[in-house]
Image (cartoon, rainbow, N blue to C red):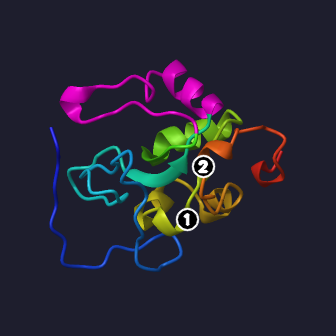
Amino acid sequence: MLHRRDTRDVERNVRGEPLKGCSTDPLTGFYRDGCCRSGPEDTGSHTICAVVSAEFLEYQQMIGNDLSTPIPEYGFPGLSPGDRWCVTASNWLRAHEAGVAAFVVLASTHERCLEVVPLEVLEQYAVDVPADPSSIDGRADDPRRGA
């Protein structure tokens, strides 16, 4: 089931700027419009634009949030390392607390996530996505991980 939403107000990212798109391949967002928009229907707050790594995907599967297996009837392709995806703020925070958080595209991360995750924490994982995001291997010794 796809959710679509027409919004008149400009939605903002965590920097207070207009929200930018996260991904159209795979097509992400609670409303499947490529953006990490949020609204009252999005009770899970799919607001963080994450660049997923293998360890992040493994952890999500371990906590019961399988992001790797395709579910075509819901328009979900299954994710691979390097994909950008709008993840829930609470599950991203759980991954952070476990030491396996995904990198975050701040310009594409909705301000609503700040209700759950402090900006200072998100900034530790901020990344400009390279032209070939598959080059992100999710190594724990990356200095942006704040080890």
Q: In which quarter of the image is the C terminus?
A: top right
* Res 40 visible: yes
Type of residue at label 2? Pro
Local crowd at mark 1 within 10 Å, few (<14), some, or many (≥20)?
many
* Residue labelled with disc 2: 133
What residue lies at 77% left-to-right and 38% top-to-bottom?
139
Residue sitting at x 80%, y 50%? 146
What is the distance, in whole Å, between disc 2 and disc 1 at their CAs? 16 Å
Q: Residues within 10 Å of mark 2 (few under 14, many from 20)?
A: some
In the image: residue 64, left or right of residue 124: left
Query: Vertically, is 52 above or below 72?
Result: below
Callout 2–callout 1 Cβ contact below 8 Å: no
Task: Tell me the number on the disc at residue 106.
Answer: 1
**Spot occupied by residue 96 in the image (x, y as percentages of width and height):** 64, 41
Closer to us: 104 or 24: 24
Residue 85 at x, y = what percent? 44, 46
Q: Is mark 1 on a helix, strand or loop?
A: helix
Task: Indicate the quadrant where residue 36 lies.
Answer: bottom left
Give the magenta range: 54-81
Hey, which quadrant is residue 70 in on the image? top left
- The quadrant of the image that shows the N terminus is top left
Residue at image x 56%, y 41%? 52
What residue is rendered at 57% in x and 43% in y? 82
